[in-house]
């Protein structure tokens, strides 16, 4: 069964909440489609970093990209991004992307908090996947039980016919 994060109904709310709570310029949640990433939802402005930075998080490690220093002032330019993998057990199934404007920079505490948020999204995806698998298994069990009951009735009819003859 394919693992993805499209099923959590609250992914868009999570993105919005993270953006508001941490005053990020943007928060985006991507899901994996093979080796590509597909935007699932976003809050705020469009992510500033390119897909290469997002794909770096697919290695399973978070990636922090601060804007380069301005040649005029030596200070940061107005963009920094943090990319955190979202996992279903050990498999990376998506990326949580957050961006800030200067003068704010990301720090390890930001990464830790976003790792927790990504873990919760991954746990939700795992729960949804397991529920779907259990539902499928229950449907198959019911189908097999119905088939077995039908065969038992047919055998009973056949047995009765043999007894009567």
Image (cartoon, rainbow, N blue to C red):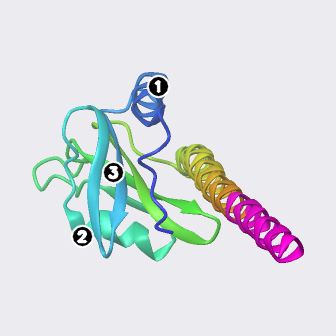
Give the residue drawn at x 42%, y 59%.
94
Mark 2 vs mark 3: which is more N-terminal? 2
Numbered badge on residue 81: 3
Whole-number angstrom distance, CA of label 3 to CA of label 1: 17 Å
Q: Nearer the viewer, mark 2 or mark 3?
A: 2
Q: Secondary structure at mark 1?
A: helix
Magenta stretch, main secondary structure, is helix
Give the residue drawn at x 51%, y 48%.
107
Q: Quadrant of the C terminus?
A: bottom right
Would residue 66 be seen by someone viewing this image from the given angle? yes
Q: Residues within 10 Å of mark 2 (few under 14, many from 20)?
A: few
Give the residue drawn at x 45%, y 76%.
59
Query: Observer-nearest residue: 17 or 36?
Result: 36
Is residue 20 toward the left or the right of residue 40 in the image?
A: right
- Find out whether residue 151 is within the magenta segment: yes
Which span of residues is magenta-colored? 145-165
Is residue 119 toward the left or the right of residue 49 in the image?
A: right
Mark 3 vs mark 1: which is more N-terminal? 1
Query: Observer-nearest residue: 122 or 116?
Result: 122
- The correct choice, above or below, for 105 with respect to 15 in the image is below
Q: Position of residue 124 (x, y in %)?
A: 60, 45
Residue hosting label 1: 17
- The correct choice, above or below, for 3 with respect to 112 in the image is below
Residue hosting label 2: 52
Q: Position of residue 101 (x, y in %)?
A: 27, 36
């Amino acid at each position: 069964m394919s693992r993805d994060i499209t099923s959590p109904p609250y992914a868009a709310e999570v993105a919005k909440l993270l953006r508001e709570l941490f005053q990020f310029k943007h928060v985006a949640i991507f899901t994996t489609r093979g080796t590509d990433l597909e935007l699932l939802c976003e809050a705020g402005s469009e992510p500033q970093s390119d897909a290469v930075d997002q794909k770096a998080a697919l290695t399973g490690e978070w990636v922090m990209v601060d804007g380069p220093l301005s040649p005029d002032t030596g200070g940061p330019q107005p963009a920094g991004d943090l990319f955190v993998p979202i996992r279903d057990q050990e498999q990376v199934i998506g990326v949580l992307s957050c961006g800030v404007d200067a003068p704010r920079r990301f720090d390890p505490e930001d990464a830790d908090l976003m790792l927790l948020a990504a873990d919760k999204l991954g746990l939700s995806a795992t729960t949804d996947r397991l529920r779907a698998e259990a539902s499928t298994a229950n449907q198959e069990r019911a189908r097999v039980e119905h088939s077995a009951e039908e065969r038992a009735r047919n055998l009973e009819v056949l047995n009765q016919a043999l007894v009567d003859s």
